[in-house]
Amino acid sequence: MKRLSCFLVGVAMLALTACSTTVTGAATAATGSPAAARPAFGAYMDVSVKRPDLAAVAKQAGLKHVNLSFALALNGQCEPGWGGNQTLDALKPEVDAFRAAGGSGSLATGGALGNYLENACATPGDLAGAYMKLMDAYGTNLLDVDIEAGVDTTKVVEALRQVQAARGTDFTFTLPVDLAGIPAERLDLVKKSAAANVPVTVNIMAMNFKTGGNWGQAMVDSAQATLDQLRQIYPNASEAVQNRTLSVTVMIGRNDVGVITQPDDAQKVIDFAKSRGVGRLGFWALARDNGACAKKVKAQPDCSGIAQKDWQFTQQFAGYTGPTSA
């Protein structure tokens, strides 16, 4: 995702048991590895802009999980840092407060801009070490790898395989999508992880692609196209497990390319997820969940660009509880 439409990261210190709504990792089940619990809904928080008070949002809107984005190569080195220019301890006070309010979170690398760890780290072992250092800093085992730029997919998958062998991490790939599903160059990551028996959840960015029809239906169509791709990649898994392998993240309000996600559009995605038993849902981004710039014609990092109540999307998505059965 972009800085305006981007994502994930998280909260080490936020124990998984703090979340009231969790689902079994879909791709984990698809490969037969031990399943990890993760909340069915998480709002992404962009660490590069002014951040909401997480503890206050937890109390006001029932927020239980955040995806903090993004960890990049600190000063261009194979060293994780927030936004590539802040040390890992920069977010700990607010994360601790959120945890005290009952919250939890996950950590994301990559995004649309900046120097990726995936490129700054020369070898799979170096990259695996950077991933584990990031998770250790926050005491979490939930990692999202958001890939929107060119990377050595073989190196990334081997690094994940090493981390998985060491600690059974719950991985997510966050990838661009359009009406046809995930583009081939990004789908390669999913295929290689499946071939290497590395369990992943596939999180699509249902945002920022052009369509001439109803936008809510277009997001649903992109999710269904991705499910069709996953059925090919995991042919031996049950349909329910294939569906749980999918996660869908939307960009609330005005997207960068002009399409607008209204609450009714978001509800179409939520209803689709309920009907299919999709593993997880999310949105970009928490700081945008307000109507302070309803007349802006370009996407903003700190408001949705539509008329809405504060935390309206947070409350709407919080009702998604994930698949009901294994």
Image: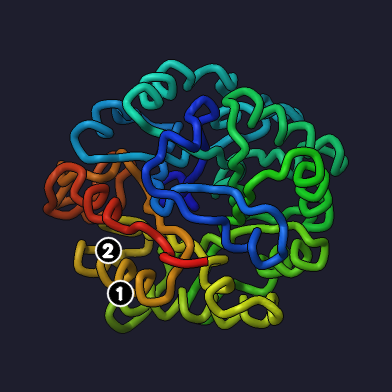
Choose top left, top right, bottom left or bottom right for residue 191: bottom right
The total of numbered circles placed on residues is 2
Mark 1 / mark 2, whichever is N-terminal:
1
Label 1 sits on a secondary structure element that is helix
Query: Badge 1: how crowded within 10 Å, few (<14), some, or many (20+)?
Result: many
28 to 63, vertically: above or below: below
The answer to whether the residue labelled 1 contacts the one labelled 2, judged by CB atoms less than 8 Å apart, is yes
Along the viewing direction, whichever of 78 and 23 lies nearer the viewer: 23
Please tell me whether residue 126 is drawn above or below residue 325 in the rendered image: above
Local SS, label 2: strand
Side (left or right) of 307 relative to 219:
left
Residue 5: x, y in percent? 42, 51
Rendering coords of residue 10 (x, y %): 51, 35
Q: Amino acid at mark 2?
A: Thr
**Residue on which the image places disc 2:** 261
x then y, percent, for residue 313: 24, 52
The residue at the point 47 percent across, 36 percent down is 17
Residue at (67, 74) in percent of width and height? 184
Where residue 275 sits in the image (x, y, percent)? 36, 76
Please state if 305 lies on the left or on the right of 112 as rendered: left
Crowd band around label 2 with a 10 angstrom C-alpha radius: few (<14), some (14–19), many (20+): many
The residue that appears at 46% across and 74% down in the rendered structure is: 223
Amino acid type, residue under disc 1 in the picture: Trp
Q: Which residue is mark 1?
A: 215
Q: Residue at x 32, y 58 (%)?
A: 320
